[in-house]
Amino acid sequence: MRMASSIGVLIVALAGFAAGQTQVSKDQNAIEGLSAQWVTSVNGKNVALLMELVTDDVVFLIPNAPAVKGKAAAEQMFKALFAQYDLEISETITETQVTGGSAVSLTEVTRKLTPVKGGTAIDAAGSGMMVVRKDTEGSWKISRVVNTLAPPPATPR
């Protein structure tokens, strides 16, 4: 009887673990979907959708520039960027850690900025980190973005 009781406890524990893993998988899939929407919106210059994907207190940390804080500042940043450049970005999530209603994803990013008025395109690549939070409706939103994008090193002559 005691053995049957122990097996029952183990089954219940494993079922709880599996349910938790299923939720983490669902969250990771939702975060990957958010990342894909982000890339599509940037490549399509869709500022309105980009602003739907971020929290009101979003912060962008960009190399060699002051932090961009808040949705209004982010919207201005993207409008100015899109007025000057056509962008082509790709992003691959290499790791995601989910803890309750927050998550951190590490990314590898490539970017090509082509001046709208003509000129040489600027290529950059690097790593990034995206912090996301669940909103009150259960949707994941981007809260913080850190990137290390930099142009490739100059070729010695």
Image: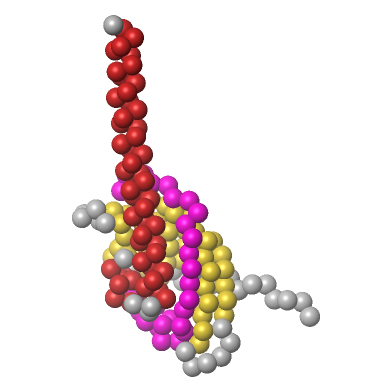
Q: Position of residue 29 (x, y in %)?
A: 36, 53
* View extreme (left): residue: 137
Quadrant of the rendering where the C terminus is positioned: bottom right
User: Which residue is outermost to the top?
Assistant: 1
Residue at 45% from the left image edge and 87% from the top image edge:
84
Q: Residue at coordinates 30% horizontally, 31% vertically from top-left?
A: 16
**Residue 91 appears left or right of 71:** right
Q: Quadrant of the N terminus?
A: top left
Viewed as shown, does residue 2 lie left or right of 121?
A: left
Q: Report if residue 30 lies within the magenta region.
A: no
Q: Which stretch is magenta?
A: 75-102
* Image coordinates for residue 42, horizontal then vertical, percent: 40, 74
Residue 87 falls within the magenta-colored stretch: yes
- Foreground: 126 or 4? 4
The furthest residue to the right: 157
Which residue ends up furthest to the bottom in the rendered image?
117
Quarter of the view holding residue 52? bottom left
> How is this picture coloured?
secondary structure
On screen, residue 35 above or below 100: below
Give the quadrant of residue 80: bottom left
Give me the residue at 36% from left, 60% from top: 33
Residue 59 visible in the current orientation: no
